[in-house]
């Protein structure tokens, strides 16, 4: 048994249960959202998934802290909303894993669990980083989204688990996006991939909606690419989340002629980690925005374990131990370790010439 084998198991079960909830909501004819104070959307599925995952962590590791994206204030203030989320949580928790990850008993307990994601983070002890739905905008447009959970110990990510309900399990399946297309298609056959990495033990993919076994779990790696000209790069769908124009200039400096694959969420980290793409560029659009740790923690260890490297736009490692945000970093550059330094050179060239 490897290090963190229990943590890995609990994280997988929790992400799988939460993904069943998000997929149940996605199966509805219409999806609605509430607007948060920063103008970004949140849905019943974000709240329900956060409740399920935090209650699983508390059941298995009562002393651990959690940095979670959402909080329970809106549910405390709105009884109708609370009941909607509680119904979803109960339905999704109707499985045989209660002995390992527990089961919420009431709507009040559910809100307490959501609010337990209020850790300030930091570089000491065991802290989980949770994004119950990463890519809520993708979820709403029925594109890619991801349920993301990572365990940090003393500020370093050791375990990462990412559920991608709308991502094909097999690379190159017909529902996979072609270059230049927006990834999507919820509910297609063969969709639902669970990505798991433990530091030092490799990166793996297995079906999201069935139990992970030795036979259905496959190790994943970056493409063995040596020339950046043949690379495929990916970026956010949202032009407000990263600088598409700068990224296009970097791609062209690398000799890349293929158009970018645009995809919401940490499904981008998953895609490059299994060789369905090579480079993920996330150059900041604003000088004040701080990336959130839950948007990158799980993907960080996944990429590392698949043979990749992740830094910020200046070549610095991402520092997950400084709080809820990556305030000491700017932008994110992820690529196969073999070409990462070439990508960084192109980033410098483009960024310096535009200053
Ligand atoms: N101005 C900005 N710059 C970078 N990221 C931003 C941003 N505004 C929001 N985000 C983050 O971008 C995430 C989605 O990433 P992507 O663009 O790769 O799909 C959002 O996660 P949530 O959807 O969990 O809120 C949100 O945290
Ligand atoms: Mg997010
Ligand atoms: Mg989110
Ligand atoms: Mg959000």
Image (tube, rainbow, N blue to C red):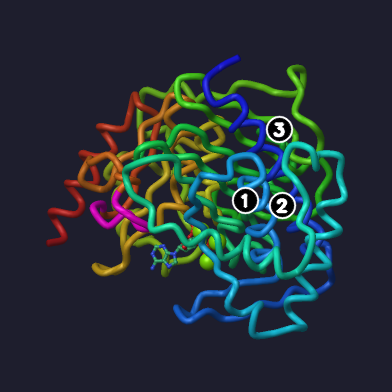
| Structural distance between the alpha carbons of marks 2 and 3 | 22 Å
Of labels 1 and 3, earlier in sequence is 1
Q: Residues within 10 Å of mark 1 (few under 14, many from 20)?
A: many
Residue 326 falls within the magenta-colored stretch: yes
Can you tell which quarter of the image residue 307 is in? Answer: top left
Residue 158 in view (yes/no): yes
Q: Secondary structure at mark 3?
A: loop
The magenta segment: 322-329
In the image, what residue occupies the spot 13% across and 53% down? 352
The reply to whether dot 1 and dot 3 touch (C-beta < 8 Å) is: no
Q: Secondary structure at mark 1?
A: strand
Residue that label 2 marks: 18
**Which quadrant holds the N terminus?**
top right
Residue that label 1 marks: 147
In the image, what residue occupies the spot 64% across and 39% down? 60
**Which quadrant holds the C terminus?**
bottom left
Q: Residues within 10 Å of mark 2 (few under 14, many from 20)?
A: many
Q: Is residue 249 left or right of residue 234?
A: left
Camera-side mark, 1 or 2: 2
In percent of width and height, residue 201 lies at: 51, 19
In the image, what residue occupies the spot 51% across and 45% down? 64
Can you tell which quarter of the image residue 167 is in? Answer: top right
| Structural distance between the alpha carbons of marks 1 and 3 | 19 Å
Camera-side mark, 2 or 3: 2
Which of 351 and 332 lies nearest the eye of the viewer? 332
Specify the principal SS of the magenta part: loop
């Amino acid at each position: 048994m490897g290090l963190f084998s229990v943590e890995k198991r609990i994280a997988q079960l929790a992400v799988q249960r939460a993904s069943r909830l998000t997929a149940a909501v996605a199966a509805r004819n219409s999806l609605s959202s509430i607007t948060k104070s920063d103008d970004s959307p949140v849905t019943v599925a974000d709240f329900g998934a956060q409740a399920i995952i935090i209650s699983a962590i508390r059941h298995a590791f009562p002393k651990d802290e959690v940095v979670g994206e959402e909080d329970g204030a809106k549910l405390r203030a709105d009884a109708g909303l609370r009941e909607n989320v509680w119904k979803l949580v109960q339905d999704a928790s109707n499985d045989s894993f209660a002995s390992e990850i527990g089961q919420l008993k009431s709507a009040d307990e559910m809100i307490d669990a959501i609010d337990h994601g209020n850790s300030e983070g930091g570089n000491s002890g065991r802290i989980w980083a949770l994004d119950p739905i990463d890519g809520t905008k993708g979820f709403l447009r029925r594109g890619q989204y991801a349920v993301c959970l990572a365990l940090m110990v003393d500020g370093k990510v050791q375990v990462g688990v990412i559920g991608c309900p709308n991502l094909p399990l097999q690379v190159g399946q017909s529902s996979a996006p072609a270059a230049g297309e927006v990834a999507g298609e919820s509910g297609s056959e063969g969709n639902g991939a669970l990505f798991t990495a433990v530091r030092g033990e490799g990166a793996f993919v297995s079906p999201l909606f069935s139990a992970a076994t030795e036979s259905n779990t496959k190790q994943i790696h970056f493409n063995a690419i040596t020339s950046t000209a043949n690379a495929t790069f990916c970026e956010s769908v949202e032009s407000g989340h990263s600088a598409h124009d700068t990224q296009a200039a970097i791609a062209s400096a690398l000799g890349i002629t293929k158009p970018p694959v645009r995809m919401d969420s940490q499904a981008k980290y998953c895609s490059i980690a299994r060789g369905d793409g090579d480079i993920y560029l996330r150059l900041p659009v604003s000088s004040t925005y701080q990336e959130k740790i839950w948007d990158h923690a799980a993907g960080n260890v996944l990429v590392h374990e698949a043979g990749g490297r992740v830094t910020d736009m200046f070549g610095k490692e991402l520092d997950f131990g400084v709080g809820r945000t990556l305030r000491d970093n700017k932008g994110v550059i992820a690529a196969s370790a073999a070409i990462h330094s070439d990508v960084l050179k192109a980033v410098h060239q483009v960024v310096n010439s535009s200053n």
